[in-house]
């Protein structure tokens, strides 16, 4: 870093630090008022894709849902999302729409071209005035993309909606695009067949509209508020946006925008970057850990533990670790899942994921209080992860 860059960072810090201090005071005041009281946080289901987020979205979108708002919430949702081949949402028969969570489209075939489980499937029935239509939502909070996942959904929709009356939505916290693995080899160079939406913008905007129309139905209003607050929490937007806007204006006026963006980009990647540091530490400490030449994610490390080509793996980009076998885990799924469930990461927040065809793994997140991990904390994370991997291997070899 040269002197000019260092001076720009000093000027940036002078602008940013007062806002950080103000945000700290706001947080203390909100905690005192109970603004952070949240049933999802209390039950520790904040980031559960299936039983929290997909379940909540499905219930709100369901015209026959317990909210008692008929199809109002669904209609408002259709106003906020990009729809393909539909130019007037009033064409869709929202009152009789069916909402399906974890919808099975059959077993995944050997070529990974068909089968799987759709997170959310919304189906609109045809009538004299309404076309048949489908919306698929792939819901991603922390989970990794599966091989050809979106491509398999696309093939299912093509087979069942020959007029291409469907939309695939890839829903993430910030509207990130799907990985090449999920898109599928045959589609990667073609025009995108999906649309990206985000919790931080699209879902929040929709929830605000739902709040506006929910009137005096207090249980519904309070639940919507709590869910909106939860999204603010998992997308780091709990504090006053007005102060953030003011800060951005100051940074722009001081011609420090480029420096700020570069710094924020690095900071937003800190979780993954820390995981990559840990992966490098594992590679340095144990020569049996390697990177597989043909594996798409170049940061993922592997260790062969069985002559039948079963590997341990640690993937920094998705904060996951566990077992992998390219030929599939047939005959091993139950035992590997049991091993995963028996191992806990004491200093990390973890979630045991479902067993997939080729993978059996656990995902983790850094403890909330360690937003800026120290060198000691990183070493603690390394020890915890490396210990878990060695335990996976030891328990497997005892089978």
Image (cartoon, rainbow, N blue to C red):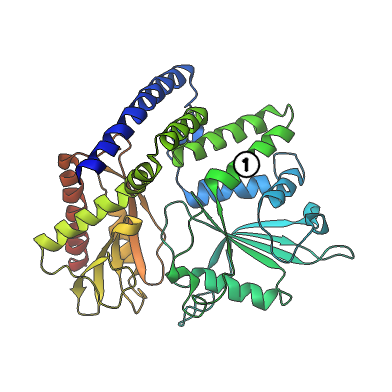
In this rendered view, identify the residue nearer to me: 76 or 389: 76
The residue sitting at the right extreme is: 128
In this rendered view, identify the residue nearer to me: 192 or 323: 192
Residue 189 is left or right of residue 268, and the answer is right
SS under mark 1:
helix
Q: Quadrant of the C terminus?
A: bottom left
In the rendered image, residue 128, in percent from the top left (x then y), is placed at 90, 65
Q: Is residue 273 above or below residue 283?
A: above
Q: Residues within 10 Å of mark 1 (few under 14, many from 20)?
A: some
In the rendered image, residue 33, in percent from the top left (x then y), is placed at 48, 17
**Residue at 74% across / 75% down in the picture?**
163
In this rendered view, identify the residue nearer to me: 349 or 184: 184
Residue 343 shows in the view: no
Residue 357, image quadrant: bottom left
Residue 209, image quadrant: top right
In this rendered view, identify the residue nearer to me: 108 or 81: 81
Q: Is residue 70 above or below residue 299?
A: above
**Residue at 81% across / 57% down in the picture?**
93
- Count the numbered circles shown: 1
Residue 363, image quadrant: bottom left
In the rendered image, residue 89, in percent from the top left (x then y), is placed at 78, 56
Residue matched to label 1: 205
In the rendered image, residue 110, in percent from the top left (x then y), is placed at 45, 82
Q: Is residue 72 above or below residue 285?
A: above
Residue 156 is left or right of residue 39, and the answer is right
């Amino acid at each position: 870093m040269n002197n000019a860059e260092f001076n720009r960072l000093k000027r940036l810090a002078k602008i940013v630090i007062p806002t950080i201090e103000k945000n700290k005071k706001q947080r203390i005041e909100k905690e005192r008022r109970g603004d952070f009281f949240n049933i999802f946080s209390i039950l520790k289901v904040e980031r559960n894709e299936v039983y929290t987020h997909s379940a909540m979205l499905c219930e709100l979108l369901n015209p026959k849902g317990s909210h008692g708002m008929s199809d109002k919430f669904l209609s408002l949702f259709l106003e906020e999302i990009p729809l393909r081949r539909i130019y007037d949402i009033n064409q869709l028969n929202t009152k009789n729409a069916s909402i399906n969570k974890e919808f099975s489209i059959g077993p995944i075939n050997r070529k990974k071209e068909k089968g799987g489980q759709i997170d959310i499937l919304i189906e609109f029935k045809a009538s004299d005035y309404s076309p048949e239509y489908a919306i698929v939502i792939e819901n991603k909070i922390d989970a990794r993309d599966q091989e050809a996942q979106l491509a398999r959904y696309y093939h299912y929709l093509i087979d069942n909606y020959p007029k291409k009356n469907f939309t695939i939505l890839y829903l993430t916290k910030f509207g990130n695009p799907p990985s090449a693995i999920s898109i599928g080899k045959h589609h990667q160079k073609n025009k995108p067949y999906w649309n990206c939406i985000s919790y931080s913008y699209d879902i929040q905007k929709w929830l605000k509209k739902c709040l506006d129309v929910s009137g005096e139905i207090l249980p519904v209003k309070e639940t919507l508020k709590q869910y909106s607050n939860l999204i603010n929490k998992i997308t780091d937007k709990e504090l006053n946006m007005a102060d953030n806007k003011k800060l951005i204006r100051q940074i722009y006026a001081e011609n420090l925008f480029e420096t700020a963006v570069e710094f924020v980009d690095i900071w937003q990647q800190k979780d993954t970057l820390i995981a990559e540091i840990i992966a490098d530490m594992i590679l340095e400490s144990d020569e049996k850990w390697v990177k597989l030449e043909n594996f798409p994610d170049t940061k993922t490390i592997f260790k062969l533990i069985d002559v039948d080509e079963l590997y341990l793996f640690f993937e920094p980009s998705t904060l996951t670790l566990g077992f992998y076998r390219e030929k599939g885990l047939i005959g091993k799924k139950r035992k590997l899942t049991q091993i995963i469930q028996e191992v806990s990461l004491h200093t990390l927040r973890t979630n045991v994921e479902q067993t997939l065809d080729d993978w059996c793994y656990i995902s983790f997140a850094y403890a909330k209080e360690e937003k800026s991990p120290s060198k000691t904390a990183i070493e603690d994370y390394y020890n915890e992860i490396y210990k878990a991997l060695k335990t996976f291997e030891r328990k497997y070899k005892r089978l």
